[in-house]
Amino acid sequence: MKRGGFLQRRTPLKAKTGFTRKAPLKASRKPAKKKQTKADLWRQYGLERPGKPRYEGLKGIYWRLLSEKVRRRDFEKYGTCISCGVRFDTWQDSDPGHYIPAGTCGFDLLFDEKNIHGECKRCNGFDEGHLIGYERGLDMRYGAGTAKKLEDRYWKHKAGNLTKEWSTLEYDRNIRKLLAELG
């Protein structure tokens, strides 16, 4: 087809439908939304983001609150390291330590309050002998066989019985519940 002296080729769209493509309408400019920073997420719950949290996002917020709850609980009830019996002056002097290590315990035991207790920095600093005292401390606090039950759950996890991580909604609900408990 000639138009104005130039040969105009038909595109496949023109050939089949007879319609030509029109230029898209210019969209009105909307102000760009400000991207939420990691600190903004923490502020949403009324918290200050620590320098380098153990976990990022909602998981990190939940871990911080659960850690505080567990350390306060153990300080008020016992006031000592579960593994070696060292006395704490305040709950902030303790670290939240896992009986089944956090790196391998799977999601099922990661946030289990019977797997997390206040420990002194030395015991939580991967002192290999601390688990003997931790096991004894668990059995004294919760009854004989508690440590064995945690170990059994760990081996079930290793055998492939995996627990899925929480959704954003579940994290949010659990964070708000902890905030209410901590006052």
Image (cartoon, rainbow, N blue to C red):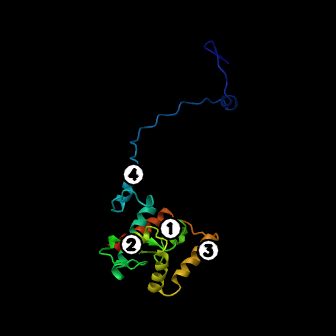
Q: Position of residue 182 (x, y in %)?
A: 34, 73
Q: CA distance from mark 1 to mark 2?
A: 17 Å
- Residue picked out by circle 1: 102
Residue 72 seen from this side: yes
What's under tag 1, amino acid-wise?
A: Ala
Q: CA distance from mark 3 to mark 4?
A: 38 Å
Which of 128/153 is in front? Answer: 128
Q: Earlier in the sequence, mark 1 or mark 3?
A: 1
Q: Earlier in the sequence, mark 1 or mark 4?
A: 4
Q: Position of residue 25 (x, y in %)?
A: 49, 34
What's under tag 3, amino acid-wise?
A: Lys
Which of 108/71 is in front? Answer: 71
Residue at (56% x, 77% y) in the render: 151
Residue at (41% x, 38% y) in the render: 29
What's under tag 4, amino acid-wise?
A: Thr
Characterize the local packing of mark 4: few (<14), some (14-19) or many (20 or more) Cα atoms within 10 angstroms.
few
Dot in front, 3 or 4: 3
Dot in front, 1 or 3: 1
Q: Secondary structure at mark 1?
A: loop
What's under tag 2, amino acid-wise?
A: Cys
- Residue picked out by circle 3: 156
Q: Earlier in the sequence, mark 3 or mark 2?
A: 2
Query: Dividing the picture into quarters, in which one does residue 150 lie?
Result: bottom right
- Residue picked out by circle 4: 37
Residue at (61% x, 74% y) in the render: 156
- Residue picked out by circle 2: 120
Label 1–label 3 contact, CB within 8 A: no
